[in-house]
Image (cartoon, grey):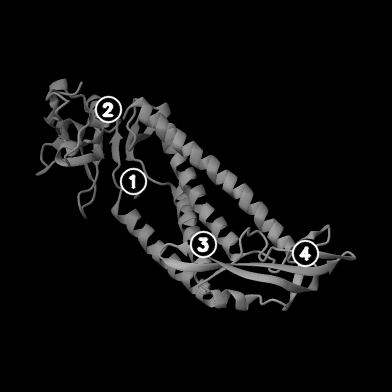
Amino acid sequence: MSTASRLIGLVFTLALLVGAAVADFYLIGRVLREHASSHWPSVSGTIATSTAAPYRNKSSRRYRLSVTYTFDAAGETRTGRVITLGESRGPSFRSEAQALRQYPVGATVPVYYDPASPGNAALVVGVQRRTVSLLLFAGVLNALALVMLRPSIRSFACRDEPIRYYLAADEPQRAVLRATHLNAIEFGVLFAGMASGVAGVCVLALPGAPLTAGGIAAGGVALVWLLGFLRRSSTLSAGRHDVVIERDMGTVTLPSRGGESPVAVDMAMVDRVELRATPAAKAKGGSGQDQSAAEVVVHVAGLDEPRTVASWITIDEAAVIASWLRQEFQLDPNDVVVSVATEDEPETPVE
């Protein structure tokens, strides 16, 4: 991966983090203002005008309601136009008649006003469903930004290290090559963000508290199942793809294959390290080395089949891992081979 692409990824992550922070700041302030409005005093007001303007909403025709109303506050007769606090536009309806029935001309309605600024009034106050849903959606941005931040910084700062695999431990007696995965905190943040997104959809789309609660519960169950499946079946699973080298004992534990247990073998039994490059870009009709995939395979005497220790990484990343394994196993350069090369990569041993 080039420096430019790493920099773009880091800038995108930081922009997402800043955007999430701005959204949080705005939405939390909006929630506090709307909550404060629930304590505003109310007076009786009269609907002076009520109109419904048509507009197109995707493929359907909708009507936006606009009203003016008069009310007495602080010894003066005032005019208000806001229906729902925090909303610049009025509610929409499927028909003009349905919209006009909401606030007919001459109807008496309760008007809520800010005692510190009586001209600031609305017919509907308190924390609104739309605000809650937007705040919950912001949780998705927070989760994505926080989870993406560490690997983005690492991929830019540690340019010569693999992105998907890294040294989780590098001690004199022990080394652990580990697939990047979400730790408990990052997994919890991601889960909370996805759950907040589901809750936001439910709050915005489902009418009534029972339906909303049921939708959130069903979405939570689905998320638990989905994320549990990911942790079991992908590289999010901590330790599943670890390569553990016990330097003082001269042994290496290779990742499991299928449902088998990890295999611990003598490092002296390692015959060679193979870098298998797959020209994925060519297979898809595209071009470019960055789109190709690779895997690193260790061949051990006595094992029927080699063991894959790293997969679906770029050629450069695979070369770093293969070089590291060669040094650990004290192999000759000729024992690290490239089995298949891309158009841009010669079929030569990895130094």
Element under disc 2: helix
Left or right: 260 as drawn, with respect to 14: left
Total numbered labels: 4
Residue that numbered label 4 is attached to = 79
How much space separates mark 2 and mark 4, taking CA atoms? 71 Å
Q: State the residue position of label 3.
A: 200
Name the side, left or right, on which 222 lies relative to 23. Answer: left
Residue at x-position 20% and y-position 41%? 308
Quarter location, residue 10: top left
- Kindly identify the residue that appears in the image at 47 percent across and 71 percent down: 215
Question: Which residue is denoted by mark 2 in the rendering?
Answer: 320
* Closer to viewer: mark 2 or mark 1: 2
Mark 2 residue crowding within 10 angstroms, few (<14) / some (14–19) / many (20+) = some
Give percent across and percent down for residue 222. 39, 65
> Of the residues shown, which amino acid type is indicated by label 1?
Gly
Along the viewing direction, whichever of 94 and 351 lies nearer the viewer:
94
Question: Which circle's residue, 1 or 4, is located before the other in the chain?
Answer: 4
Residue highlighted by disc 1: 239
Vertically, is 218 above or below 314?
below
Q: CA distance from mark 1 to mark 4?
A: 66 Å
Say whether disc 2 or disc 3 marks the residue closer to the N-terminus: 3
What secondary structure is found at the residue carrying circle 4? strand
Between residue 19 and residue 314, name the one nearer to us. Answer: 19
Give the residue type at disc 3.
Gly
Could you tell me residue 342's position as x and y percent?
15, 30
Pointer 3: residues within 10 angstroms few (<14), some, or many (20+)? many
